[in-house]
Amino acid sequence: MQVASARWIAAALALTAAVWLAALAGLLAIANRVHDDVPYLLAVKLPLLQSRPELIFAGESRTLYQLDASLAAQLIGKPQGAAVNIAYDAGEPLALAAAMHRQPERFLKAHVVVSVAPFLFNEGVRSAAVYPQDVAARLGVVDQMSSFLPLRVGTLIRFIREAFGARLAADQHVADLAPLPAALGLKIIDRTQPDDHWPAEIGSHAHYANWNLSGPKARFEIGALCNMVALTRKLTVVVPPWAPRYDRARDPSWRDKDDQYAALVADAGRRCGFDVLNIQSIPGLDQGNYADEMHVNASGVPIYTRYIVSRLKR
């Protein structure tokens, strides 16, 4: 009796798993069909382009929380709206390139400055929070399931959610009709991470986990950066610094991985014709100006902005 019950339980579990996998595959197939390369988080910032800005800051969170477009406009002697910040959390080049193709007249005469982070190119990073959604859409259902199941199912769930969100944003013309974001797109981190939450070193940081620059992430995202060159007046790609409490000389794992990812971007820049700013430190940007290991707090925003604009003027 116990053996028979165990067999029924095992059969029921197997059937449940098979049904769940089939349902997940079906949802992924639908998500792939409805997916739009411009995610909701980028779409809601695109109304800022209505001012026909000369300087467009884009990319991931180290632009979103660190570059004050209002101050940048002052520094280049232009009126408000001449510079905007359309970056968003975990922003990827593929999404920005899609926005450029969709509204070419708003980018063609602008200098576009886009920040990149190692997780965008490192195939070893598969977490839901930062995996590039447009890369996921290019994998197909079989590759999606084999890449992320069973331990990274959250990445697939986020992809499904984001795909439907991007399609809704496109159907509702959010990129044209959404209200203008406050502060020309800048967001401020108004708290500083407690000391016991700071990583001991960066070499083992999640962005460098299972280091691999030879997968589809690097291929697709580098390709998108190269594609942008013909769509802008000028393209500059920024590799931003980490907090100054971390020392590359004492962390060879971090130094080597960071050099490899910076070299990947620099090589693409030479080949495709965009500038690269590989910034390892910024004069005057001290540890007290950082909210966490990657992002500055409110006090660091003007220092970071002034430095980036000064480098763009050279």
Image (cartoon, helix red, strand yellow):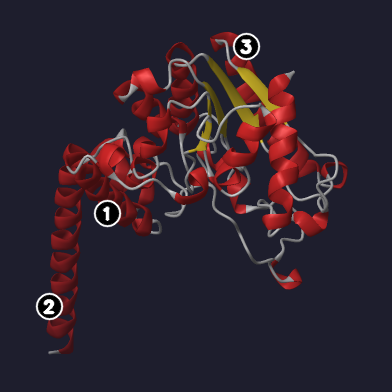
Residue 270 is labelled as 3
- The disc labelled 1 sits on which kind of residue? Arg
Residue at image point 14% right, 49% down: 26
Residue at image point 50% right, 43% down: 184
Label 1 sits on residue:
161
The residue closer to the viewer here, 170 or 20, is: 170
Q: Is residue 3 above or below residue 18?
A: below
**SS for dot 1:** helix
**SS for dot 2:** helix
Q: Residues within 10 Å of mark 1 (few under 14, many from 20)?
A: few
Q: Nearer the viewer, mark 2 or mark 3?
A: 3
Residue 8 is labelled as 2
- The disc labelled 3 sits on which kind of residue? Arg
Residue at image point 22% right, 49% down: 164
Q: Earlier in the sequence, mark 1 or mark 3?
A: 1
Distance in Å between CA atoms under marks 2 and 3: 63 Å
Where does residue 216 sit, x and y in percent of width and height?
43, 30
Q: Earlier in the sequence, mark 1 or mark 2?
A: 2
On the question of residue 57 being in view, the answer is no
Where does residue 248 sit, x and y in percent of width and height?
82, 42
Q: Residues within 10 Å of mark 2 (few under 14, many from 20)?
A: few
